[in-house]
Image (cartoon, rainbow, N blue to C red):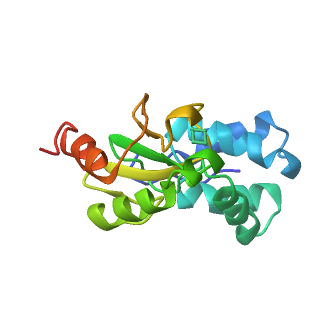
Amino acid sequence: MSMSNGHGNGYDADITASIVSRFDARPEQLIQILHGVVERFGYVPEAAIRQLAEALNLSRADVHGVVSYYHDFLTGKPGRHRVKICQAEACQAMGSHELTAHATGSLGMALHETKDDITLEPVYCLGNCACSPAVMIGDRVYGRVTAERFDELIGGLEGND
Ligand code: FES
């Protein structure tokens, strides 16, 4: 299949086509294929969703459904800073929902969105349950994060001070 990419944002349809063919264009391999796309582009662009639906003979809604079910698949280009707030049980018990509400309010964006180079994401257990609620920024995990501490961490991000 040939689709010209024509996108200025680094998306390349030929690369996606080669990932699809590595999995013999088998629709049951969709998750693995999506992982391949994320590995290559850092997220799942809308153009890839369209292309995968066509190549795997699925509807676009099917592909979208899988992408949004798995919280690791971002559909927009991530910001330089990825901020993940744990939503799993132990953190929930220690107020991670309230912390998330604070974060979305103070950053002015919803989960899965990107603004000012910050991408806010949910995550399901960071292995830091003893120090809930946990937040991961880049590859560092922070424990017992209060609303004030969250604001400090965000304020300390490069390019955000
Ligand atoms: S439940 Fe949040 S770190 Fe384990």
Observer-nearest residue: 79 or 120? 120
- Taking the spot 40% from the left edge, 42% from the top edge, the residue there is 82
Locate residue 72 relative to residue 135 in the image: left or right.
right
Asked whether the viewer can see residue 108, the reply is no
Q: In this view, does 28 lie above or below 50?
A: above
- Taking the spot 83% from the left edge, 44% from the top edge, the residue there is 29
Q: Extreme left residue here?
A: 161
Locate residue 26 relative to residue 31 in the image: left or right.
right
Observer-nearest residue: 102 or 74? 102
Q: Extreme top residue here?
A: 140
Q: Position of residue 64 (x, y in %)?
A: 67, 64
Observer-nearest residue: 47 or 62? 62
Q: Where is residue 16 in the image (x, y as percent from the top left)?
A: 63, 43
- Taking the spot 42% from the left edge, 40% from the top edge, the residue there is 144
Q: Where is residue 1 in the image (x, y as percent from the top left)?
A: 71, 50
Asked whether the viewer can see residue 140, the reply is yes
Q: Quadrant of the C terminus?
A: top left
Q: Where is residue 15 in the image (x, y as percent from the top left)?
A: 60, 39
Locate residue 11 relative to residue 31 in the image: left or right.
left
**Which quadrant of the frame does ligand 1 lie within?**
top right
How many numbered circles are shown? Answer: 0
